[in-house]
Amino acid sequence: MSRLLLGACASAAIHKACDLASKLTQEGHEVRTVLTERAAELVSPQLFEALTGEAARTSEFGAAREGGMDHIELARWAELLVVAPATAGTVGRLAQGLADDLLSTLALALEPAVPRLLCPAMNPVMYAHPAVRRNLEQLVEDGWQLLEPEAGRLACEEHGQGRLPEVSRIQERIRELLPG
């Protein structure tokens, strides 16, 4: 099938990223996961490895790295990048072109033809904040596809738009974006 990169950020919705990784692998896709360092504090990279059969990465530095230029190798390997959940911090870094971790660095290294899907998940007030809205608009202008969060009860016990979409909706959007 396809080669998919899954970026996962530190959000209470990261449990859905685990489910997404599992379901995409079961569909026959090769899935490699890149977690932000904070995401790796919420969920062990080993869990993603167990779900996908591929080592999950959190950094381009240290003993776990695979090559001198992991961000380039991952970017050239991928047929699609999906960031789910995407936090306000990662949205801001991506919109500004800042490359201070493996996920943001490989996102900049992707060829323009590689589809990119952003699935934000955050508190509704954060999601509605003008800075976050500007950053999302910039990413869409830059070619990212945006899957808007759903409304409902969030982990912070507030209600509103900010819930990561259900895994089935993310899978459907990925199928629409895949080449061929």
Image (spheres, rainbow, N blue to C red):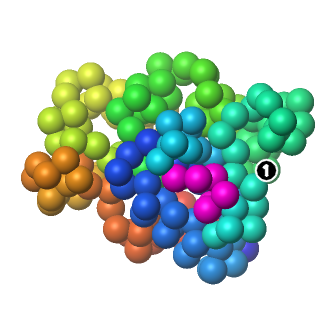
The quarter of the picture where the N terminus appears is bottom right
Expressed as whole percent of the image width and height from the top left, the position of residue 49 reads: 69, 62
| Observer-nearest of 60 and 105 | 60
Q: Quadrant of residue 68?
A: top right
The residue positioned 62% from the left and 80% from the top of the image is 27
Residue 83 at least partly seen: no
The residue positioned 17% from the left and 42% from the top of the image is 124
Residue where numbered disc 1 is placed: 77
By secondary structure, the bulk of the magenta-drawn segment is best described as helix
In the image: residue 42, left or right of residue 109: left
Give the farthest residue toward the right.
67
The residue positioned 51% from the left and 42% from the top of the image is 41
Q: Quadrant of residue 89?
A: top left
Tag 1, which secondary structure?
Answer: helix
The residue positioned 61% from the left and 62% from the top of the image is 47
Amino acid beneath label 1 = Trp
Based on the picture, tell me whether residue 142 belongs to the magenta stretch: no
Q: Which residues are magenta?
A: 43-48
Expressed as whole percent of the image width and height from the top left, the position of residue 111 reads: 70, 38
| Observer-nearest of 156 and 82 | 156
